[in-house]
Image (tube, rainbow, N blue to C red):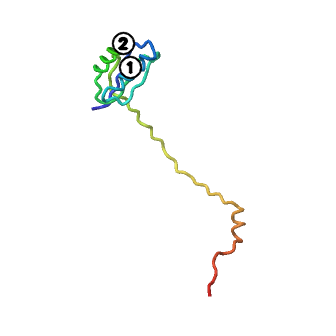
Amino acid sequence: MAKQKIVVKVTMNSEKKSRKAMQIAVSISGVESASFVGSDKDQIAVTGEGIDSVELTSLLRKKVGHTDLVSVGPVEEKKPEQKESKPVEAKMQINPYDYYYNSHVVPYYYYVY
């Protein structure tokens, strides 16, 4: 099955009812994510695979209040745009003091007779 997106409009008068509506929406099997959408945050968008939209709507009507099924459709997946990659130029910086101090170092080897 393909992923689908269901948008449900719920009449929520208080913070308590909105929390309860979100808990019901998330509890249905197959739900991957749920969020509030719309200008008044009175709609719940649910995405996932194999979600029964009639079951979701009827549960919200029983537990929260008046509910309308706004839309059911496939999820629009955004494809990332491919950018042309430029080769990375590495610049090597030489510390002039490094050469000066390391050139007069006594070697760490010796002869054993």
Q: Quadrant of the N terminus?
A: top left
Badge 2 marks a residue whose secondary structure is loop
> Marks 2/1: CA distance?
9 Å
Badge 1 marks a residue whose secondary structure is helix
User: Whole-percent x and y of residue 18?
Assistant: 42, 18
Residue wearing tag 2: 65
Q: Which residue shows up at 36% across the image and 20% down it? A: 7
In terms of depth relative to the viewer, which is nearer, 93 or 3?
A: 3
User: Whole-percent x and y of residue 31?
Assistant: 34, 29
User: Whole-percent x and y of residue 42?
Assistant: 43, 16
Instruction: Say what amino acid the circle numbered 2 marks.
Output: Gly
Q: Which residue shows up at 41% across the image and 18% down it? A: 43
| Number of disc labels | 2
**Which comes sooner in the sequence, label 2 or label 1?**
1
User: Whole-percent x and y of residue 98?
Assistant: 69, 63
Extreme residue in the bottom direction: 113
Asked if residue 33 is positioned above or below residue 99 in the image, the reply reads above
State the image quarter where residue 13 is shown: top left
Image-based side of 60 in relation to 91, left or right: left
Q: Which residue shows up at 34% across the image and 19% down it? A: 71
Instruction: Say what amino acid the circle numbered 1 marks.
Output: Ala
Residue wearing tag 1: 21
